[in-house]
Image: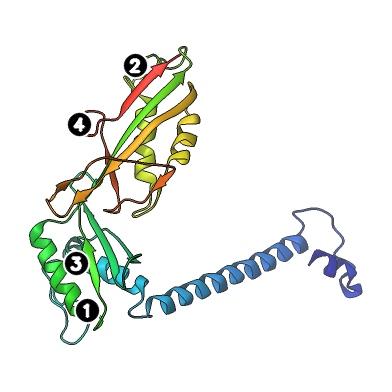
Amino acid sequence: MIGKVQSEPALAGLNSTSKTSIWRLFVYCVAFAIWTLEILFDTHKSEIDEAIANQKKGSELWYRNMALAFQFGFDLIQDTDLFDNTNYTAEQIENSKIIKYAAVNPSETESRLIVKVATEDSSGVLAPINDIQKTAFDYYFDEINYAGVKYTIINYAPDRLKLNLTIKVDPKVIDLNGTKILMSAVDVGEKPVENAISEFMKELPFDGKLVLNALIDKLQNIDGVVNPILDAAATSWIDVSNGGYGSMANIYGEVLPVSGYFTWSMTDPEFKTVINYVV
């Protein structure tokens, strides 16, 4: 735009080279307005594309959105898949949406959709919905489901993850108990490796693969960690035949959680993670 102004004979008087000259500021304002309009067009297109995708009823995305839209304690408007929110406050409506996480994928072995759901407990940790909520959710899904579509709803306790790690540390930074040596008033007793594992688990998307190399990469970036070594990793999940957890199975490279998410522990004897710190 500046080049066009400078090449126009009628505008030869606009020859100041100062970045704050009036004519350059006008050019900047026009350019900024054009750029803003382009961003608005891109945003509008993205919103339209998303709306079209969400309107494809019966798709996996639609089923996922319907799972997230479930309102516990509310009834559907007759002959629709929308809830009747008449005379309810925005807070009541939001609190009724107990499904915080959902994933829908086709089964690898049969013509069936696998619907994984989870909520959050009072501390924000992922958890299954309770039996009463599950009964209501099952009834709702039967109502909105397309005729002939088979599905299975998975509302399990989290898959258990057990790790065995050897962490070579710089003893000037992290002691052999895994505790950070240089501490401020807010991080007394901080254990960076354990904190990093907790962060990594929270960063995993719902129903996302756990990639062991990605975990090692995160541990490698901790100040004071010289070499993190993953000696073994195993997981177990709910066995529907007995309602409890099955045997631990070794993880090779990566694994997809059956429940959609994981839990890990430094204290539970059944799946305790073991971290050995060495120099």
Q: Which sits earlier in the primary sequence, circle 3 or circle 4?
A: 3
Q: Which sits earlier in the primary sequence, circle 4 or circle 1?
A: 1
Q: Which sits earlier in the primary sequence, circle 1 or circle 2?
A: 1
- CA gap, disc 3 and disc 4: 37 Å
| Residue with the mark numbered 2 | 177
Q: Amino acid at mark 1?
A: Ile
Residue 48 spot, x, y in % from top left: 47, 77
For residue 196, above or below residue 255:
above
Q: Amino acid at mark 2?
A: Asn
| Residue with the mark numbered 3 | 93
In the image, farthest residue toward the left:
132
Q: Which sits earlier in the primary sequence, circle 2 or circle 4?
A: 2
Q: Which sits earlier in the primary sequence, circle 3 or circle 2?
A: 3
Q: Amino acid at mark 4?
A: Asp
| Residue with the mark numbered 4 | 268
Residue situated in front as seen by the camera: 32 or 147: 147
| Residue with the mark numbered 1 | 144
- CA gap, disc 1 and disc 2: 54 Å
Q: Residues within 10 Å of mark 1 (few under 14, many from 20)?
A: some
Under tag 1, what secondary structure?
helix
Q: Which sits earlier in the primary sequence, circle 3 or circle 1?
A: 3
For residue 21, above or below residue 221:
below
Residue 268 spot, x, y in % from top left: 20, 31
Left or right: where 20 falls relative to 125: right
- CA gap, disc 2 and disc 4: 18 Å
Q: Residues within 10 Å of mark 3 (few under 14, many from 20)?
A: some
